[in-house]
Image (cartoon, rainbow, N blue to C red):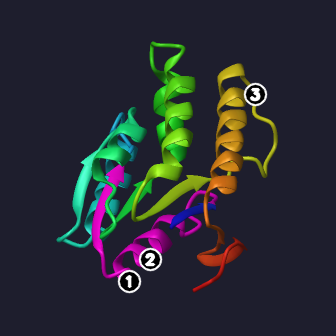
Amino acid sequence: MKELIIGGARSGKSALAEQFAQESGLEVVYLATATAEDKEMAERIRLHQERRAENWSLVEEPFHLAEALRANADDDRVLLIDCLTLWTTNLLLNEDPGLFQKERDALLACLPELPGRQIFVSNEVGMGIVPLGELNRRFQDEAGWLNQAMAVRCDRVILTVAGLPHYLKGAST
C-alpha cells in the first residue's frame, strides 16, 4: 500500500504518518530527507527524532530516494518517507541541474514495483500566493506537480489540516 499525507507546515502530517507506521505492526524504516543546514532545521530534526520509536530503523537520504526505497522496501516492512518537499528542495539546490528530473523520474518509476507499505509525507504548497523569485516559483511548481503525480500512484491520499486527517482518496481504515 502506498499512502501520501499532505498538509501545510505544522498541520500534523508527520505525526499522522508516524501513528500509521506504529499502528501497522510492521518493522518501520524511517527514510529522512532533511539536512541540518541551519540551527532551526537542526532543531526540527531533533524534535522528529525524539518522537520516533526506539526500535525504528533510520535511513538518511537527501538525494537518491528511489535507490533507498528499492533497498529498504519489503513485504513485512513499512517505509515512512519524510518528506518529499525537503527532498525536492535538496535536489533543486544541488549543483547538478539535471539531478531533480532524473531522481523525480526514478522515484515515480519505482513506485509500482515496491513491495510492502510506504507512507510519503509532503507539504501542500499551492494554497497560497505565487511566491516572488524564480527559484521559489519553481519549487512551488515542482512540489505541486510531484504531489499530483504521487497522488495518482498512491492508494490513499490524506490532507491534514489542524491535526485532522481528511481522506481525499482511499478508505479511512
Task: Kindly report which numbered mark, 3 or 1, lies closer to the viewer in this rendering.
Answer: 1
Q: Nearer the viewer, residue 118 or 142?
A: 118
Q: Residue at x 57, y 25 (%)?
A: 101
Disc number at residue 132?
3
Disc number at residue 23?
1
Q: Residues within 10 Å of mark 3 (few under 14, many from 20)?
A: few
46 displayed left or right of 17: left
Percent of width and height locating residue 153:
63, 54
Q: Residue at x 26, y 66 (%)?
A: 50
Mark 2 vs 1: CB contact within 8 A = yes
In the rendered image of this protein, does residue 57 appear above or below residue 86? Answer: below
Q: Which residue is mark 2?
A: 20
Between the residue at mark 3 and the residue at mark 2, the CA separation in whole angstroms equals 36 Å
Task: Kindly report which numbered mark, 3 or 2, lies closer to the viewer in this rendering.
Answer: 2
Q: Residue at x 47, y 13 (%)?
A: 96
Q: Nearer the viewer, residue 123 or 114?
A: 114
In the rendered image of this protein, does residue 43 appear above or below residue 36? Answer: below
- Displayed quadrant of residue 163: bottom right
Local secondary structure at mark 1: helix
Q: Amino acid at mark 2?
A: Phe
Percent of width and height locating residue 128:
79, 48
Q: Residue at x 63, y 50 (%)?
A: 150
Mark 3 and mark 1 lie on one chain; the one further toward the N terminus is 1
Q: Amino acid at mark 3?
A: Leu
Between the residue at mark 3 and the residue at mark 1, the CA separation in whole angstroms equals 41 Å
Magenta stretch in the rendered image: 7-32
156 displayed left or right of 68: right
Local secondary structure at mark 3: loop
- Furthest residue in direction right, as rendered: 129
Disc number at residue 50?
none
Assess whether residue 163 is covered by the magenta stretch.
no
Assess whether residue 21 is covered by the magenta stretch.
yes
